[in-house]
Image (spheres, rainbow, N blue to C red):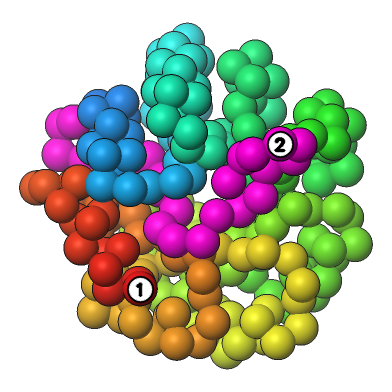
Amino acid sequence: MKTTGKPTLPAGLYGITAEAFSHGRSNLEVAEAMIAGGIKILQYREKRHKKNYCDIYAECCALRKLTREHGVLFIINDFVDIAMLVDADGLHIGQEDLPTAAARQLLGQQKIIGLSTHSPEQARQAVADGADYIGVGPIFTTATKENVCAPVGLSYLDYVVQNIKLPFVAIGGIKEHNLAEVIRHGAESVCLVTEIVGADDITGAVEHLNGVRS
């Protein structure tokens, strides 16, 4: 969470937008409901080929205003230019996106940079490259992300807990029924996408899942 200086990854539920799974609700509506339920970090994740870039920018402007008003950490996935324009708290990138060092050169030292990792080698490289936190996954099979790699399972999560000093978020196929297991393996920050954005009562779902997590 951001206090002074560079933000740090908060423990708890890690919120991600996924309009395709939100049953017609806008990303702003979903974000408002997640924040009302207690989400402390929100990542904007939409693909440019599915949404007009001007609309993506407008959404990020609105979400930056909302998250700032509520003291919620705001991370943008992939779009380093938009992260800079809206003064997001940070950027999340994948293995095939802009290299961490290049993103750091653009964003500076006061922004948080997260990197998706899928193996011990990638986790170690993330440390060497100066990432602030890593995504660990997909833990289980997931349908919310295109061209995703095979599930890495709990063994990779165990490796990260035991060997990597960076904060991390466990992600990929995590649902209410397996959330407690992921937490038992050491995850303090956990992302559930469809379980939250697809819920009839998003605020209630966040509150309930935070209860499971604790």
Above-or-below relation of 124 to 204: below
Tag 1 and tag 2, C-beta contact below 8 Å: no
Q: Nearer the viewer, residue 180 or 117?
A: 180
Percent x, y of residue 180:
34, 82
- Residue 214's tag is 1
Q: Secondary structure at mark 1?
A: loop
Percent x, y of residue 185:
50, 87
Residue 66 seen: yes
Q: Is residue 161 found inside the magenta-colored segment of the image?
A: no
Q: Tell me which residue sits at (70%, 87%) in the image.
A: 162
Residue at the limit of the structure toward the front, as seen here = 4
Q: Nearer the viewer, residue 76 or 55?
A: 76
Q: Give amino acid for label 2.
A: Thr
Q: Secondary structure at mark 2?
A: loop
- Residue 132's tag is none
Res 51 quadrant in image? top left
Percent x, y of residue 199:
15, 51
The magenta segment is 1-25
Residue bearing mark 2: 4
Q: Is residue 4 found inside the magenta-colored segment of the image?
A: yes
CA separation in Å, label 1 and label 2: 26 Å
Q: Is residue 75 left or right of residue 109?
A: left
Tell which circle, 1 or 2, labels the residue nearer the N-terminal end: 2
Q: Main secondary structure of the magenta part?
A: loop
Above-or-below relation of 88 to 44: above
Q: Tell me which residue sits at (35%, 72%) in the image.
A: 213
Q: Nearer the viewer, residue 144 or 190?
A: 190
- Foreground mark, 1 or 2? 2
Percent x, y of residue 204:
15, 52
Above-or-below relation of 124 to 23: below
Q: Residues within 10 Å of mark 1 (few under 14, many from 20)?
A: few
